[in-house]
Amino acid sequence: MLVRNGLSRSEFAERVEAAEGLDLDEFVQQRCEDPLFRQAMRHIRLMEREFADQLVITDEELKARYETDRDTIYSRPEAVRASHILLDTRTLVSPDDKAAALERAEAIAIEASAEGADFAELARQHSEGPSGPNGGDLGFFPRSGAMVEPFAAAAYELDVGGISGVVETQFGYHIIKVTDRRDATVIGFDEAKHSIRRAIRAEKLGPVRNDYVLALREQAEIVYPDQG
């Protein structure tokens, strides 16, 4: 699952901690203790035991699926990780109000670029975007398709640790800090094959499960309680 979503274990752990407030081991343990999850796993094991011949996955199937999905699922473009401080100008109407917001943004940009400045703390204090409480962190994003163009262009011009001047978009004034950079990569077959196997197994399991349930229903004898 991580491979198909282009995530490393550490990146997934960060998302889990941000969303659930748990470290990865705690999250996994919680999932394993969930009665619905345990029931689903028992059903899968039953299907695999009873219909093993219908759920066989060959090396040829794995390799064919990898070739089909390599350029989409298993190729990861270059990405940067950035944080920002946003002063939202979308509700500002008068030129004076926008000028005041720009002046404030420029002052924050100077403060953020000062030696020893804590960018994350400044974001928590000043940012009016939803990422503010998280120190402005936006995670990794590619050059195209994720952020509006002025923001992406400015972020991709920065080195890791670099801080931009004020960048204007339709959302307002941003100060951007790049915190990490990731080269474009292609996940190899050996690393991807376990994920591919799970995906193909799930595809084969669906029809098998449906046929099994229908067969059970056809064999079931419905007894109505005596109404007399």
Image: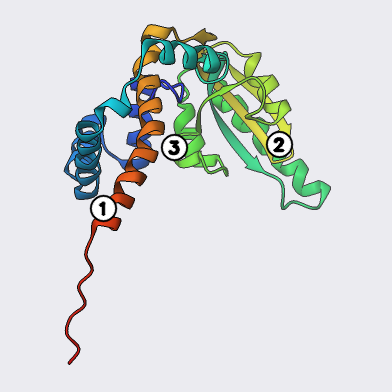
The residues tagged by marks 2 and 1 sit, at their Cα atoms, a distance apart of 71 Å
Residue at label 2? 103
Residue at label 3? 134
Secondary structure of the residue carrying tag 1 is helix
Residue type, mark 1 in image: Leu
The percent coordinates of residue 97 (x first, y second) are 75, 48
Near-viewer residue (118 or 200): 200
Residue 152 lies, with reference to residue 93, above or below; the image says: above
Residue 207 lies, with reference to residue 8, above or below; the image says: below
Q: Where the N terminus falls, by quadrant?
A: top left
Q: Residues within 10 Å of mark 3 (few under 14, many from 20)?
A: some
The residues tagged by marks 3 and 1 sit, at their Cα atoms, a distance apart of 51 Å
Displayed quadrant of residue 57: top left
Secondary structure of the residue carrying tag 2 is helix
Residue at label 1? 216
The percent coordinates of residue 218 (x first, y second) are 29, 57
Displayed quadrant of residue 33: top left
Displayed quadrant of residue 188: top left
The first of marks 3 and 1 along the sequence is: 3
Q: Which is closer to the viewer, label 3 or label 1?
A: 1
Which residue occupies 51% across, 35% down? 123
